[in-house]
Each structure stands twice: as C-alpha cells, then as structure tokens.
Amino acid sequence: MQSRLCTSLSALALFAPCAVAQIDPSGIDFVTIGAVNNPAYSGPDFNNTVTGRGSVPYEYRIGRTEVTTSQWLEFYNLFYGRVPHLTAPVRWGAFDRGQGQSPRFALSNFPDADLFPVSGPSWRTAAMFCNWLHNDKSTDLSAVMNGAYDVSTFGYEPGTSIFTDQHTRHPDAKYWIPSLDEWIKAGFYDPNHGGQGVGGWWWNTPATTNVPLIHGPPGQGQANTGFLLPEDGHFRIPLGAYPYVQSPWGLLDVAGATTEYTETVRTVGGEKLRRVAGTHWTNAVTGVDAIYMIGDEFPSLPSLFYGLRVAAAVPGPGSVVAIAVSLAGCMLRRRRCGAVSCQKPVGKATP
C-alpha cells in the first residue's frame, strides 16, 4: 500500500498541479476543493438538474477515487451482522469466506482486488461508513450509529415511501457523503481556466473537456463505462487505471465504475429520493458523462450501480504539517526504491 501511495501522489503532482493529495487517518487520499463562492453552473442543462447548482461557500475535501475494496473490507468485517441497515456489496474485490470464519470477508485472488470499486451498499450503509470514519474507526457499535448521520432517524413514514432519514450531515461532521453541489464542483468546475486562480468555467465532462469521453478499457478509452469485457473483466478494472483522465481538481474515475451517492434530497411526486451522480459500468450512450446526467434513488435500496466517494472537512494547521511530513517521507522512499521497483504501472488512457 505504501508503494501505491507513492505512485498516487507522484501522478497527482505530475498531472494535476492545482490539487494536493492528502494522506489522512481514514486511509483515503483527499484533494482540497477551494475557489470559495465559485459561480454556479448555468448550462447547458438538458435535464434541468444542475442549473444554479455547484457554488460552494467553503473549502472541503473529497476523495480522489471512490471508496476502494480494502477500505470497505475493514469496515465490513467489523460490523457485518451486528447493526441494522448494513447491506452487502454487490460487486467488489472481496468474497464471503462463510459463517464462523474470521475474518468473514477476504480479498479475492485477482490482481489489484484491493483497488476495485465497491458497488451495492445502500445510501444508509454509506452513511454508516462515514460515521465510522468520523469516530476514528472505532470498533464499538456506537461508532456507526452516529457521527455524521443519526441512524435512529432512518426509516419511512408509516404506509408511505417518504423516508425520515436525516437530510444532511451534522454541522461538525468530519467525513460525509458529498452534497450534489460539492460533487459537481469537484468533478467539473475549473478554478484555473482563465489563468492561475481565475475560474468561472464549467466543463461538460469530468476530464477538462467538452468532448464526450471515449468509453473503453485502459489504453483504449477514458472511462470504465459503456463496454463489456470477457468474464465480466470490466468489473475488475481497478480505480486509478485512467490516470490521465482527471477533473480540474485531480479527481479520478468521476466517469465510470459506479454512480456515486450524494446526500442531496429531491422530492418527486410526494416521494423523497437521494440524488446520485456520474456514470456506471454499463452506461453505453455517448454523452452520458455530461454534468447534467443526475439520477435519484431511495436510501434503503442497494444496487449494482451505486457506490461512494467520501467528502471531508479541511484539517487544521497541525494536521497540514503532519501531511507535509508524510508526503516528504513517501517521496523520499520512492527515490530510494527507484522508479521501477517502487511504482506499479497502470494502463494509460487516451488523453
């Protein structure tokens, strides 16, 4: 994992100079999203879903990738079968070893299985994962019951499909499911389009281009969506396999792999739904990676297509110093290891 972290930080420095990868106790590589009070998106918006959205009046962080199998595996082995609302992944890089086994779940025997995206946890399960991170990965059951979201609010009004779940995270949450505004800003807003720090520009795809992305495997395409490989190989493409395809902030895999949860609520015909964003593996229509392709889902329903990218608070000054020291150590180790032995190559997608 240390060598992968070196590779991740080095790639970010090379290809996304405006972003800074941040080592975090959660094990997630975060990027800080600045440009406070950026202008909102103003179109085109064929589905009328994001016009006026995307302006965020504070700094925040968001994961460079979706949650990986190794990050989810630690959480799931701790709490599977012990708490309500915890749904099983549909696709990930681990398997169930069976009742009575310890640990219950283990990595599959595929290359880079630890970096496979996690699909299938419900929105509520994703919220519990954020609670666990907020509570410093405690093994106590209370660690998943509150922190960012109060699990005691999860439910539906009697005889209806109107959920009672807490709409937004607690104000003091350290980790949370990003809002739709946070998600689209991190994926599509360019803070340096008019020059360093001169923003005001929204791209139509999460790759600093308005040209529809090419769907295809690493080395042939730009996103893990819209194609099939033999023996379901498209599900086994690791996160970060398209390092040249990044949002203006340095996010990877905003298009492809799983559609991502947001905490934003939409009321439709008397029903309340959570907004979801981004393409997933089997989206096959040209242009579906566009900023306005937003959907909805009930918070209790798992799906093959849905996953999670975590948002987080910006650390204080003391934490920033620790991050800088860790980054320096990582880069030093990379130089000692050598470019060949310390880095693991990934497929290069078409720019």
Image (cartoon, grey):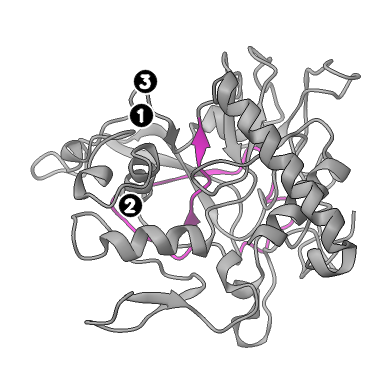
Return the x and y of residue 90 as percentages of the image width and height: 42, 70
Query: Does the CB distance between marks 1 and 2 fall below 8 Å?
Result: no
Circle 2: element type: helix
Query: Is residue 289 rendered to the left or right of residue 137?
Result: right
Instruction: Looking at the picture, tell me which residue is in the foreground, 113 or 218.
Output: 113
Magenta run includes residue 17 = no
Decide: few, some or many residues near mark 2? Use Cα within 10 Å; few <14, some 14-19, many ≥20.
Answer: many
Query: Is residue 115 rendered to the left or right of residue 351?
Result: left
> The N terminus lies in which quarter of the figure?
bottom right
Return the x and y of residue 210 as percentages of the image width and height: 83, 40
Query: Is residue 288 rendered to the left or right of residue 208?
Result: left
Q: Mark 3 points at which residue?
A: 171
Q: Mark 1 points at which residue?
A: 169
Query: Does the CB distance between marks 3 and 1 fall below 8 Å?
Result: yes
The amino acid marked with disc number 3 is: Pro
| The quarter of the displayed image where residue 219 is located | bottom right
**Which residue is at 62% across, 45% downward?**
29
Q: Give the range drawn in magenta.
A: 283-312
Return the x and y of residue 190 as percentages of the image width and height: 78, 27
Residue 233's place in the image compared with 163, above or below, is below
The amino acid marked with disc number 1 is: Arg
**Which residue is at 52% across, 73% downward?**
93
Is residue 48 among the parts visible in the rendering? Answer: no
> Which mark is first along the chain, 3 or 2?
2
Return the x and y of residue 89 as percentages of the image width and height: 40, 66
Label annotation for residue 125? 2
